[in-house]
Image (cartoon, grey):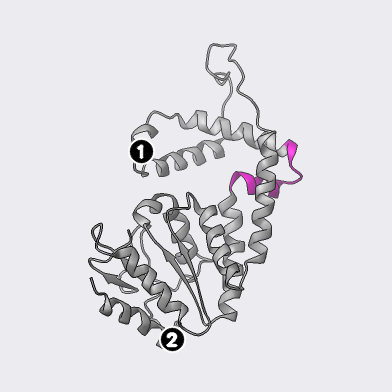
């Protein structure tokens, strides 16, 4: 199936000012399986790379979380001569500390009061309980997982998080190191964005492609929304308000019959 119109609409953006209020900075591709969506996205990437001083990154279903997505983007940009050096260093630190954390995590202890882990007489911290509840709500939206989330006790999840945090605090050097292991996206994403902004200063355009988003969206949607529309995101609050998982009207090329697959 030919996609001349869609290719032309994408190529046309390279002749426009990306700072313009009506610049279509986001193209949302949608459609039924088998209509050539991934092929179109690959054609877009080829068209982008044909432009002078344009770099691209392509993320597919080989990634399983936001950290892996950022790592994939960094690797692709690095192969084009624009490595995200600060991010790569922070990512290496995260991998090292996560390995160290593996030997620091406490093993489950028998419950002298008859519970599975001895938690009957112990209460989780309020902050961990809230975080666990928020996390479980998010998991409840993931296809294939949501049906099981209702059976998970947020208090037990929070208590486990408190134990991990306490063990990491004893093992690692600083609170920042503990936070990096416990919440890597919150620490890595700002560094990723700073490095990406530096690449954008050196290049005419940086174009990111996310294919098969119907599969990766459940684990990438919150992160992608935040790095684009968040207070310190790529749009810096300039884009219209949009719910996570919903492409912003008026700022995308919405091409029926040709979505990510």
How many callouts does the rendering have?
2
Question: Residue 2: horizontal and vertical position, in percent?
Answer: 24, 74
- The chief SS type of the magenta part is helix
Q: Closest to the observer: 49 or 220?
A: 49
Magenta region includes residue 226: no
Determine the secondary structure under disc 1.
helix
Q: Which residues are magenta?
A: 170-183
Pointer 1 residue: 146
Residue shown at 69% from the left, 45% from the top: 97
User: Can you say whether 12 is above or below 44 in the image?
Assistant: below
The dot on residue 17 is 2
Distance (Cα) linking label 1 and label 2: 43 Å
User: Can you say whether 35 is above or below 253 in the image?
Assistant: above
Determine the secondary structure under disc 2.
loop
Residue 240 in sight from this viewpoint: no
Residue shown at 44% from the left, 54% from the top: 220
- Considering every residue shown, the one lying at the far front of the view is 1
Q: Quadrant of the N terminus?
A: bottom left
Question: Residue 217: horizontal and vertical position, in percent?
Answer: 39, 54
User: Can you say whether 122 is above or below 128 in the image?
Assistant: above
Task: Please identify the quarter of the rendering in which residue 24 is found.
Answer: bottom left
Q: Residues within 10 Å of mark 1 (few under 14, many from 20)?
A: some
Residue shown at 23% from the left, 67% from the top: 256
User: Can you say whether 30 is above or below 5 in the image?
Assistant: above
Task: Please identify the quarter of the rendering in which residue 19 is found.
Answer: bottom left
């Amino acid at each position: 199936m030919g996609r001349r119109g869609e290719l032309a609409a994408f190529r046309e953006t390279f002749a426009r000012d990306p700072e313009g209020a009506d610049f279509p900075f986001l193209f949302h591709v949608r459609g039924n399986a088998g209509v050539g969506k991934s092929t179109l996205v690959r054609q877009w990437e080829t068209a982008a790379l044909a432009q002078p001083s344009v770099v691209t990154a392509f993320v597919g279903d080989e990634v399983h979380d936001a950290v892996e997505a950022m790592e994939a983007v960094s690797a692709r940009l690095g192969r084009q001569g624009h490595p995200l050096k600060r991010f790569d260093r922070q990512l290496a630190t995260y991998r090292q500390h996560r390995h160290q954390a593996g030997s620091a995590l406490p093993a489950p202890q028998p419950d002298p009061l008859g519970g599975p882990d001895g938690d009957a007489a112990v209460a989780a911290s309020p902050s961990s309980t809230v975080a666990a509840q928020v996390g479980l709500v998010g998991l409840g939206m993931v296809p294939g997982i949501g049906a099981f989330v209702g059976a998970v006790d947020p208090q037990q999840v929070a208590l486990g998080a408190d134990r991990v945090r306490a063990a990491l605090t004893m093992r690692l050097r600083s609170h920042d190191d503990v936070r990096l292991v416990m919440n890597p996206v919150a620490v890595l994403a700002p560094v990723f964005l700073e490095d990406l902004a530096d690449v954008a200063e050196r290049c005419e355009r940086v174009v990111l492609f996310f294919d098969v988003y119907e599969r990766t969206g459940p684990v990438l949607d919150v992160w992608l929304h935040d790095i684009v529309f968040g207070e310190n995101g790529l749009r810096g609050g300039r884009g219209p308000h949009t719910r996570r998982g919903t492409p912003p009207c008026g700022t995308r090329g919405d091409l029926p019959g040709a979505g990510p697959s």
